[in-house]
Image: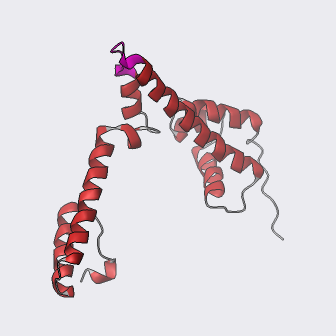
Amino acid sequence: MKLARRHYKLNDEVINKVRFLAEFGAPLEHIASAVGVSYEALNKWIKNAKINNNPTDLEIRLLQAVNEGRAAGGLRLVSKIAESADKGETKDAQWLLTHAPAYRKHYSDNAAVTRARAEGIEAAVAAIAEAGLTPEQERMVLLRIQAKTGQQLLPADEER
């Protein structure tokens, strides 16, 4: 029987601080130092909860705190944008949404470009599949798209 992990630094106070800092978009590296633990330890605890590596109750609550904090912060900023839109005062909140590490993946211009690019590649691959090409022709076209976009379209063993 495996012994349960004991956390000497992970406690309710740390979890509450993590939630608060996550709400304001702080990256995990900064959160870790602010609550007095190493980034490696914080990341390990979160990963244990994410991959269901026999997580402790504290690890599960820590992951929930990060997720809840990020969600609350994103909603707060989106709400600020909505409230300020009538006044034309949206620059601060927009900047935070597009630059804060926790939110930029979803709200930045680059996120929209990345999503559009992925959708375009998916559409092209679907069209190629429906074009009636021989398997070798299809493979060659996919390899060319892969070379130009950097998007992995074929399994590594099929690239040769």
Q: Nearer the viewer, residue 16 or 83?
A: 83
Horizontal side of residue 72 vs 124, given as left or right? right
Name the quadrant containing residue 100.
Answer: top left
Which range is magenta?
A: 84-92
Which quadrant is the C terminus positioned in?
Answer: bottom left
Check residue 153 for magenta coloring.
no
Q: Which residue sits at x=25%, y=54%?
A: 117
Which quadrant is the N terminus positioned in?
Answer: bottom right
Check residue 86 for magenta coloring.
yes
Q: Position of residue 157 (x, y in %)?
A: 32, 82
Name the quadrant containing residue 54.
Answer: bottom right
Relative to 152, say whether 22 is above or below.
above
Q: Which residue sits at x=76%, y=50%?
A: 57
Q: Nearer the viewer, residue 121 or 11?
A: 121
Q: Position of residue 113 (x, y in %)?
A: 26, 46
Name the quadrant containing residue 51.
Answer: bottom right
Q: Does any portion of residue 91 appear in the rendered image?
A: yes
Q: Which residue sits at x=61%, y=43%?
A: 38
Horizontal side of residue 81 vs 69, given as left or right? left
